[in-house]
Amino acid sequence: MKIKNGFVLRDVCGEQVIMGEGIGALDFGKMLCLNETAAFLWKQAETLGEWTVDSLAEILLNEYDVSPEQAKADIIAIVGEWQKVNVVE
């Protein structure tokens, strides 16, 4: 998977928000607020370019004190939200 072109993470009044820029803004028309963990994962996904649930789960395990099962479940939930609003492909 990868983040679709035209979507960026910005700090808006202290909140981490995904928003569309350029063509992405026309199709998206809204902002998506992320919690600290989701924003961390978005930044990691941006850095990786192409990524999988497993690769993000491994990064999460290296950064946070969670079990492998919890990390994978959290990634699946977060990526599911990103897919729902169509910001990843």
Image (spheres, rainbow, N blue to C red):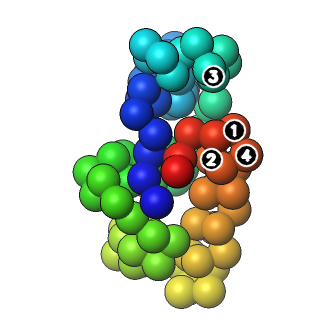
Contact? badges 3 and 2 (CB < 8 Å):
no
Real-space CA distance between mark 3 and mark 4, rounded to the nearest whole angstrom: 12 Å
Q: Which mark is residue 28?
A: 3
- Residue identifier under label 4: 84
Residue 3, percent from left and from top? 44, 45
Left or right, 80 with reference to 35: right
Give the amino acid at mark 1: Val
Residue 9, percent from left and from top? 43, 31
Q: Is 88 in front, or is 40?
A: 88
Give the amino acid at mark 2: Trp
Contact? badges 2 and 4 (CB < 8 Å):
yes
Residue 58 seen anywhere in this rendered image of the structure: yes
Q: Residue at x 62, y 86 (%)?
A: 69
Residue 79, percent from left and from top? 61, 57
Other-residue count near label 4 (Cα within 10 Å), few / some / many at <14 / 14–19 / ≥20: few
In this rendering, is residue 11 above or below 65?
Answer: above
Contact? badges 1 and 2 (CB < 8 Å):
yes
Give the amino acid at mark 4: Lys
Q: Earlier in the sequence, mark 3 or mark 4?
A: 3
- Residue identifier under label 1: 85
Q: Earlier in the sequence, mark 3 or mark 1?
A: 3
Other-residue count near label 2 (Cα within 10 Å), few / some / many at <14 / 14–19 / ≥20: some
- Residue identifier under label 2: 82
Q: Secondary structure at mark 1?
A: loop
Contact? badges 4 and 1 (CB < 8 Å):
yes
Q: Residue at x 58, y 77 (%)?
A: 72
Real-space CA distance between mark 2 and mark 4, rounded to the nearest whole angstrom: 5 Å
